[in-house]
Image: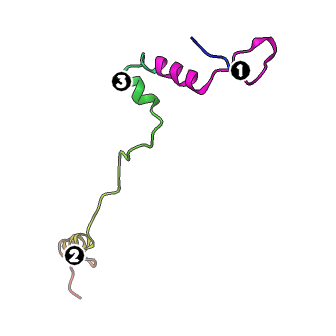
Amino acid sequence: MIAKRKNQAFRGGAYEPTPMDIRRSCDEIQATWSPRQRAKRDRSPRVAWWTVPMIRVSDIVEAMNGERVENPPYGGAGG
């Protein structure tokens, strides 16, 4: 049974659900959702699906130095 609020008068007997009525109705609707639909409608904070990779500066320097040894910046021709 759905309760009407007693503290307010509405013309024509308009329905004004209580917060408990709204919660109950939402729970009934959500009970019919599949797991896929529940995930699609989830409004909680999102977990980051992708994050920036962590790279050590020393790895970058080593990679740059290795690249310079293989490909000298001036073509390797002696002066």
Is 14 positioned to the left or the right of 70 in the image? right
Q: Which residue is mark 3?
A: 35
Locate residue 30, reporting x and y percent.
45, 21
Secondary element under disc 2, as helix, strand or loop, is helix
Q: Considering depth in this image, is 33 or 48 the residue closer to the camera? A: 33
The crowd level at tag 3 (other Cα within 10 Å; few <14, some 14-19, many 20+) is few
Amino acid at pointer 3: Pro
Name the residue type under label 1.
Lys
Contact flag, marks 3 and 1 (Cβ < 8 Å): no
Q: Position of residue 56 (x, y in %)?
A: 26, 69
Q: x, y (%) of residue 64?
A: 25, 72
The kind of residue on which mark 2 rests is Asn
Left or right for 42, reference 2: left
Number of the label disc, if any, that sits on residue 6: 1
Which is more foreground, mark 3 or mark 1?
Answer: 1
Count neighbours of disc 1 (C-alpha within 10 A) and say few if under 14, some if 14 to 19, many if 20 or more: few
SS at circle 1: loop
The segment highlighted magenta reads: 6-29
Q: Residue at the location (59% across, 14% down)? A: 2
Front of the two marks 3 and 2: 3
Sequence-wise, which precedes: disc 3 or disc 2? 3
Q: Is residue 5 magenta?
A: no
Residue most toward the bottom?
A: 79
Residue lying at 76% horizontally and 23% vertically, measured from the top left? 8
Q: Mark 2 highlights which residue?
A: 65
Q: Position of residue 53 (x, y in %)?
A: 30, 58
Query: Considering only order in the chain, which callout, 1 or 3, is on the residue closer to the N terminus?
Result: 1
Looking at the rendered image, the quarter that the C terminus falls into is: bottom left
- Residue 15 located within the stretch drawn in magenta: yes
The chosen color scheme is rainbow
